Image: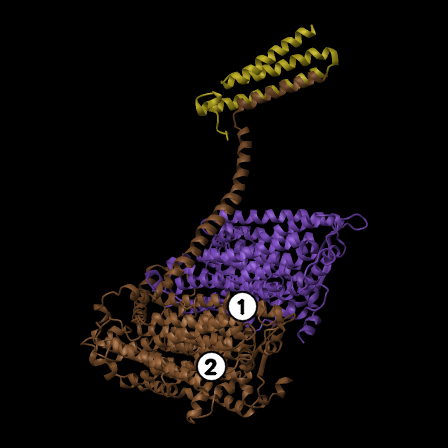
């Protein structure tokens, strides 16, 4: 009834359920193609192979060998195989895979237009069917269209479409091509479900679904144990977060009796502000976010996730999935704004992660690892934003980051593609195509990629007028402003006053900005500048990637350059009228506005002069970072990976990522396994229950039986003696009695 | 007269029991069993003077059973001797658990 | 529509008895066929036996499907009920009837049984007639347990299940089958004897005016009252019987041995149906008969503690199993722990979730055992270390195994999630700490199943034996498809099942709360 009343109900928005459905169809088609091509039905009697003997084997053997060889070559990696055999369905897949994304993006745009003209602040809820109706628990399969989910849908379908196109070039010689697109389409389906869900449970479906796709795509080349391990690690670490998400849902349901966003937004006030319940809910939710968005202490899976194909890293591990945590905090802003302690925790965790990951990024040699840690660091910024209650700033950085980080990843993909091609052409299988020590001077071979990646680098470093500058500055400015007056500044985290925490957050953010500028410039210098270290044989084969890959890069380049226009701060629009002020903030106002106001409280806004000073300071830091990197680093002194000497001291600690993986392994993973194996399984199960209790009672019964059996020796003489003895005793007894 | 008969019977019975318990030769054990049976027969006959002829009827039963038992028992012993070349009870342990 | 059609053929009057009788007829037919075909060779005997068995199981399944429509799920009365005196002087009747919970479990049983025959299609070569006849007798026993409304009748069916399964494991099992089958038998027997004593006590205690014992479930429910601590002792006796069957920690050690040694069909039936007998027993007998004992805080916290220990323990021990079947067996301990938590948390959500997990576990674990059986038939090993990389040579198998494993992990969208979610969200209202601890298992479940998945289908295809493996054949795919469909159907649209079990589940909860409120201050959700 309410749906009919909504102004969007009569527009294209009522087809919102088509948004996730279209990629799902793509998944089904591509998955079916993948299965049809691979499937060879087995014999009717699978165990008969053993009985039929040699004739069958003789037929099967060469076939199996050939089969194995085909796959053996294929899994050595994209581009590494001797002769390229394209998948027989590759042409169809190339149309279906990106095609569904184009459709989805078109639909998203149409819906966006409809929303703009409708101008209704209330969310439009499209209920599909009743999913879990049990007693007073009512969970519907329902989609919610509002300002926040619309923005996310546009980012996902837009960036997703570009990355799908890029993938056509990057992956089309892979023998698992249809499988790749099936997974990628499935990912988009789940991601759209995540952002469109009208309650926490539907979001959770998407939440776990994207984790699943991430698992499948990280382990895409599963024949390599390292890849399969990385996929598993990602899934398991994410599940730790999911535990938090689930407990948060249980708390919400037992205290508010609902899991619908709309209902929670209405009734959240019933929870006492700053109370233990709402704080616990938010902290458990944040545990989920930390898992999905790779924050301390659960960030360890993201760098390993680079084992997947590079477009996957761009889509899932940079632009969309890893930002789901930020989205969830923004979505739950009504709750977080009631829990200052939880919000401070979010902000502080984000700031520490931003700085910590940036230090590791300084010393990585694998180009994708640098970007991975950079992603972790940037996600930290976003959490600072949503943590300090500047929800729209967090979402803004999410968007710009999606632009420039997708560009960086796809650019690096383009570089890796070209490196692979060169190594492949020269039959060089020993050198690492992702190690920056094997690159250098690529500027002259790949000028377009070089130029576009510099745009992204300047954006991430925070140099005006690139997009990253605006979003990052807004976050840092908000952290500074909140320290001066807000509910957060009045609260305290573990005894430390909120404003001190917020100043710490701000300083950490600035420090991370400096490091970001340094490591990104380092990456660019080592990759594109200085002399080339690829090797004399391979060098002539280095060239720009095909247009299907470079095209999406160009679009992303424009977006990285101009993305700041989405949310220009007042200070800038006062100086020059570039466009409307704070466009995104106004757009998100219906969703997060109230929560933002609640956090900001009665605090006075920072004066314009202070703001200008802060901006100047931030720009100075970015430029200083770039300058330091250019001055200090000498690309010409670098030697190829095979000739490099191991690093020492702090450098090796950074290169080994502060030994966090090793610490977790020694402190958590191995003790759990040892405990399970030695104490629980062999100790309690086999030792205590089975040996002592079960077999022990059997042994006791056997012992009693043994005693009885000893009486029956089978010696007639003994029986006779006992008989006589008994007779004598009986006689005595009779004698006594009479 | 009665006392003497019963004493003789008891003595014969005791000899029989001791023989069964101590001897190893199957034939001797077998004869000792017969001795015990006949000791009992003697007391039946002796006591029948006091309690009527029922005891003597019993004796006839016992002798019949003893004859049958002797036939079967001796046959078994001969069969075992043919098989084992011995009638020592300690060698006959096939059924021992 | 369907309902009227079924009513016109008097469906509800004969269905339950026919369901009980048909498998017995099938077993007899198999026995005749066995003696008639004694002169044929082994292959022909296998072929004829499995076809006849499949015919009977398919018929059983088809006629049972009508229950889905014919039963009035909202009604508080027993549906399709019947009562015939059996040993009237002792008050023992052939008294049967069903409610929503029973119908759902019965349909699950009748639908899975034909699939187990297909799963044994080529693997049972020795004495095929005896094997399938035992499976048929087992079916009668299992269905009888679900529909018995007389305690002695229930006990008879309860024991009737035991013997065929004992023989199936003992004759067609693996290396240590004798140890496993004896362990299974003795564990179960220990519990059921205690239950028999309790049943006799109840029967004698609730005598009718003529002084004859009464074993009528409804009558006992209305009139029984027990002096002093007798209710606790009676509950304890039922508890042990059912807890062994569930199996709850620490009565679970028969399960891994039984599963590892049992043939594929045995494992499937054991996991999919027989483990549900324990939880069904709690729902049908232990809770309604002894509400005061259940509401006793000591009893409840003990059971919930054992359930949570089982949940975490099963998951942790699964992580270190080298044998895939043992891994799945321990994971069953974990899943059934969720069911127990759900039942004893006594909220609508948790109870409904528990009933749903019963079905989900049957689907997921049944499918897992079938999949294990399929690779076992090809490689004659179940050790994870012997596999690796077989997604390359068996892509269909890999897809199926992945879907089933994800469902067992409880990924949303599959059936595993909805059950766990409902149990936990319901249990959190009354037992927040237990529910939170139980929730950690979402992590461990991912660890052990993904680890197994990786070691079987991913990683390098290093072993030549694995490189020569053949993918699934049409029969195997057809046999797995119903499971896959069920996984998604239950995961995406469980409402039909939830609606069918709703009123029965709430009645049980209300009974426990209603009768207990006077004696102890239990929290109503």
Q: How many marks?
A: 2
SS assignment at label 2: helix
Horizontal placement of A248 versus B6: left or right? left
Q: Which residue is mark 2?
A: A393
Q: Colour of chain A?
A: brown
Q: Are marks 2 and 1 in contact (CB under 8 Å)?
A: no
Please, is residue A202 above or below residue C92 in the view? below
Residue C41 is at least partly visible in this image = no
Q: Residue A92 in the image: x percent, y percent?
A: 39, 83
Mark 1: few/some/many CA within 10 Å (<14, 14-19, 20+): many
Q: Residue C276 in the image: x percent, y percent?
A: 59, 59
Q: Quadrant of residue A658?
A: bottom left
Find the residue positioned furthest to the left: A536
- Report the front residue among C459 and A464: A464
Q: Residue A102 in the image: x percent, y percent?
A: 43, 86
Q: Residue C471 in the image: x percent, y percent?
A: 40, 67
Identify the subunit bearing mark 1. A
Find the residue positioned furthest to the bottom: A577
Task: Identify the residue at image location x=32%, y=76%.
Answer: A518
The letter of the yellow chain is B
Please, is residue A578 above or below residue C55 in the view? below
- Report the front residue among A276 and C304: A276
Q: Which residue is mark 1?
A: A246
Q: Quadrant of residue A248?
A: bottom right
The verdict on a common chain for dots 2 and 1 is: yes
Please, is residue A68 above or below residue A526 in the view? above
Q: Colour of chain C?
A: purple
Q: Quadrant of the N terminus of chain C?
A: bottom right
Residue A708 is at least partly visible in this image = yes
Identify the subunit bearing mark 2. A
């Amino acid at each position: 009834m309410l749906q009919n009343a909504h102004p969007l109900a009569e527009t294209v928005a009522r087809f919102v359920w088509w948004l996730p459905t279209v990629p799902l169809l793509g998944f089904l088609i591509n998955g079916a193609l993948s299965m049809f091509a691979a499937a060879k039905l087995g014999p009717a009697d699978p165990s008969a192979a053993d009985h039929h003997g040699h004739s069958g084997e003789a037929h099967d053997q060469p076939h199996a060998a050939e089969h194995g060889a085909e796959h053996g070559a294929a899994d050595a990696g994209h581009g590494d195989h001797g002769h390229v055999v394209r998948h027989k369905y590759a042409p169809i897949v190339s149309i279906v895979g990106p095609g569904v994304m184009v459709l989805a993006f078109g639909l998203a745009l149409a819906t966006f237009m409809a929303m703009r003209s409708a101008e209704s602040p209330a969310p439009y809820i499209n209920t599909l069917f009743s999913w879990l109706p049990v007693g007073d628990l009512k969970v519907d399969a329902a989609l919610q269209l509002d300002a926040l989910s619309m923005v996310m849908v546009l980012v996902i379908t837009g960036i997703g479409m570009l990355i799908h196109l890029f993938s056509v070039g990057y992956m089309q010689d892979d023998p698992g091509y249809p499988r790749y697109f099936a997974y990628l389409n499935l990912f988009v389906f789940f991601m759209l479900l995540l952002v469109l869900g009208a309650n926490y449970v539907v979001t959770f479906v998407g939440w776990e679904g994207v984790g699943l796709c991430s698992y499948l795509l990280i382990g895409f080349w599963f024949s390599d144990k390292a890849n399969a391990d990385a996929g598993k690690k990602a899934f398991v670490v994410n599940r730790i977060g999911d535990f938090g998400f689930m407990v948060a849902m249980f708390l919400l349901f037992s205290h508010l009796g609902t899991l619908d966003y709309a209902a929670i937004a209405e009734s959240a006030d019933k929870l006492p502000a700053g109370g233990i319940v709402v704080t616990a809910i938010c902290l458990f939710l944040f545990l989920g976010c930390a898992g999905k968005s790779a924050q301390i202490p659960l960030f360890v899976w993201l760098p390993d996730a680079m084992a997947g194909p590079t477009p996957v890293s761009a889509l899932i591990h940079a632009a969309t999935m890893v930002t789901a945590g930020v989205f969830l905090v923004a979505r739950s802003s009504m709750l977080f704004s009631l829990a200052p302690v939880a919000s401070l925790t979010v902000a502080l965790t984000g700031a520490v992660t931003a700085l910590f990951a940036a230090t590791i990024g300084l010393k990585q040699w694998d180009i994708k690892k640098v970007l991975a840690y950079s992603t972790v660091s940037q996600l930290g910024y976003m959490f600072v934003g949503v943590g300090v209650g500047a929800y729209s700033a967090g979402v803004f950085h999410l968007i710009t980051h999606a632009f420039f980080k997708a560009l960086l990843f796809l650019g690096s993909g383009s570089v890796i593609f070209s490196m692979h091609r060169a190594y492949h052409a020269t039959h060089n299988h020993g050198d690492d195509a992702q190690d920056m020590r094997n690159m250098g001077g690529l500027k002259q071979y790949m000028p377009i990629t070089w130029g576009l990646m510099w745009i992204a680098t300047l954006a991430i470093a925070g140099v005006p007028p690139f997009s990253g500058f605006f979003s990052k500055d807004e976050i840092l400015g908000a952290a500074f402003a909140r320290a001066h007056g807000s509910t957060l500044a009045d609260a305290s985290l573990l005894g430390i006053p909120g404003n001190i925490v917020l100043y710490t957050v701000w300083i950490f953010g600035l420090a991370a900005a400096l490091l970001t500028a340094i490591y990104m410039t380092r990456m660019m210098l080592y990759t594109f500048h200085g002399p080339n270290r690829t090797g004399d044989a391979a060098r002539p084969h280095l060239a720009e990637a095909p247009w299907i890959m470079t095209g999406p890069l160009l679009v992303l380049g424009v977006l990285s350059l101009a993305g700041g226009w989405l949310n220009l701060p007042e200070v800038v629009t006062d100086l020059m009228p570039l466009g409307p002020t704070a466009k995104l903030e106004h757009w998100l106002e219906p969703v997060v506005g109230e929560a933002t106001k609640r956090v900001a409280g009665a605090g006075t806004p920072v004066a314009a002069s202070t703001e200008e000073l802060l901006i100047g300071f931030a720009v100075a830091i970015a430029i200083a970072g770039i300058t330091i990197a250019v001055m200090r680093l000498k690309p010409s002194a670098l030697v190829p990976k095979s000739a490099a000497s191991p690093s020492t001291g702090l450098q090796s600690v950074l290169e080994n990522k502060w030994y966090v993986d090793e610490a977790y392994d020694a402190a958590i993973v191995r003790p759990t396994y040892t405990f399970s194996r030695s104490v629980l399984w062999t100790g309690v199960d086999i030792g205590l229950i089975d040996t002592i209790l079960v077999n022990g009672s059997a042994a006791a019964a056997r012992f009693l039986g043994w005693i009885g059996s000893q009486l029956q020796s089978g010696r007639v003489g003994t029986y006779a003696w006992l008989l006589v003895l008994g007779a004598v005793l009986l006689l005595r007894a009779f004698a006594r009695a009479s | 007269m009665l006392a003497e008969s019963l004493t003789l019977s008891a003595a014969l019975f005791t000899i029989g029991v001791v023989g069964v318990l101590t001897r190893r030769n199957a034939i001797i054990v077998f004869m000792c069993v017969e001795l015990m049976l006949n000791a009992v027969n003697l007391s039946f006959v002796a006591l029948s003077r006091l309690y009527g002829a029922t005891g003597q009827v019993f004796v006839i039963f016992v002798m019949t059973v003893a004859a049958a038992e002797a036939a079967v028992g001796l046959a078994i012993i001969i069969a075992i001797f043919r098989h084992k070349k011995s009638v020592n009870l300690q060698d006959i342990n096939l059924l021992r658990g | 529509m369907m309902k009227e059609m079924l009513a016109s053929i008097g469906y509800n009057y004969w269905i339950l008895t026919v369901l009980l009788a048909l498998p017995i007829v099938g077993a007899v037919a198999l026995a005749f066929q066995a003696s008639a075909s004694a002169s044929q060779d082994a292959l022909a005997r296998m072929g004829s036996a499995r076809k006849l068995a499949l015919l009977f199981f398919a018929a059983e399944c088809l006629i049972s499907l009508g229950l889905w429509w014919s039963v009035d799920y909202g009604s508080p009365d027993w549906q399709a009920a019947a009562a015939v005196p059996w040993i009237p002087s002792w008050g023992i009747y052939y008294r049967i009837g069903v409610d929503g919970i029973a119908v759902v479990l019965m349909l699950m049983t009748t639908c899975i049984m034909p699939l187990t025959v297909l799963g044994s299609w080529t693997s049972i070569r020795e004495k095929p007639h005896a094997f399938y006849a035992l499976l048929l007798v087992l079916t009668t026993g299992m269905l009888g347990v679900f529909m018995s409304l007389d305690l002695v009748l229930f006990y008879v069916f309860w024991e009737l299940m035991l013997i065929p399964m004992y023989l199936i494991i003992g004759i067609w099992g693996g290396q240590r089958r004798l140890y496993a089958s004896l362990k299974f038998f003795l564990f179960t027997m220990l519990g059921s004897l205690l239950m028999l004593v309790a049943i006799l006590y109840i029967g004698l205690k609730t005598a009718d005016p003529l002084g004859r014992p009464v074993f009528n479930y409804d009558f006992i429910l209305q009139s029984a009252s027990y002096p002093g601590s007798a209710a606790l002792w009676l509950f304890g006796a039922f508890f042990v019987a059912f807890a062994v069957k569930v199996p709850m920690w620490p009565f679970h050690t028969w399960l891994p041995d039984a599963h590892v040694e049992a043939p594929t069909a045995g494992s499937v039936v054991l996991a999919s149906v027989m483990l549900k007998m324990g939880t069904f027993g709690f729902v049908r007998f232990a809770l309604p008969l002894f509400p005061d004992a259940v509401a006793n805080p000591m009893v409840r916290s003990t059971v919930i503690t054992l359930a949570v220990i089982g949940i975490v323990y099963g998951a942790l021990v699964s992580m270190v199993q080298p044998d895939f079947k043992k891994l799945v067996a321990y994971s069953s301990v974990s899943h059934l722990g969720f069911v127990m938590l759900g039942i004893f948390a006594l909220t609508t959500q948790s109870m409904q979730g528990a009933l749903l997990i019963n079905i989900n576990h049957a689907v997921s674990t049944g499918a897992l055992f079938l999949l294990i059986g399929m690779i076992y038939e090809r490689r004659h090993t179940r050790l994870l270390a012997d596999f690796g990389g077989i997604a390359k040579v068996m892509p269909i198998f890999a897809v199926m195994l992945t879907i089933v494993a994800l469902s067992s992990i409880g990924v949303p969208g599959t059936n595993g999630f909805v059950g766990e979610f409902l149990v936990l969200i319901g249990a959190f209202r009354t037992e927040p700490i237990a529910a939170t601890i139980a929730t950690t298992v979402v992590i461990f479940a991912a660890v052990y199943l993904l680890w197994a998945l990786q070691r079987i289908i991913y990683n390098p295809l290093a072993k030549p034996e694995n490189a020569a493996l053949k993918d699934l054949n049409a029969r195997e795919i057809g046999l797995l498809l119903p499971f896959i469909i069920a996984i998604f159907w239950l995961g995406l649209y469980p409402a039909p099942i939830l609606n069918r079990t709703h009123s029965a589940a709430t009645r049980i909860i209300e009974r426990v709360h209603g009768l207990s409120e006077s004696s102890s201050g239990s929290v109503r959700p």
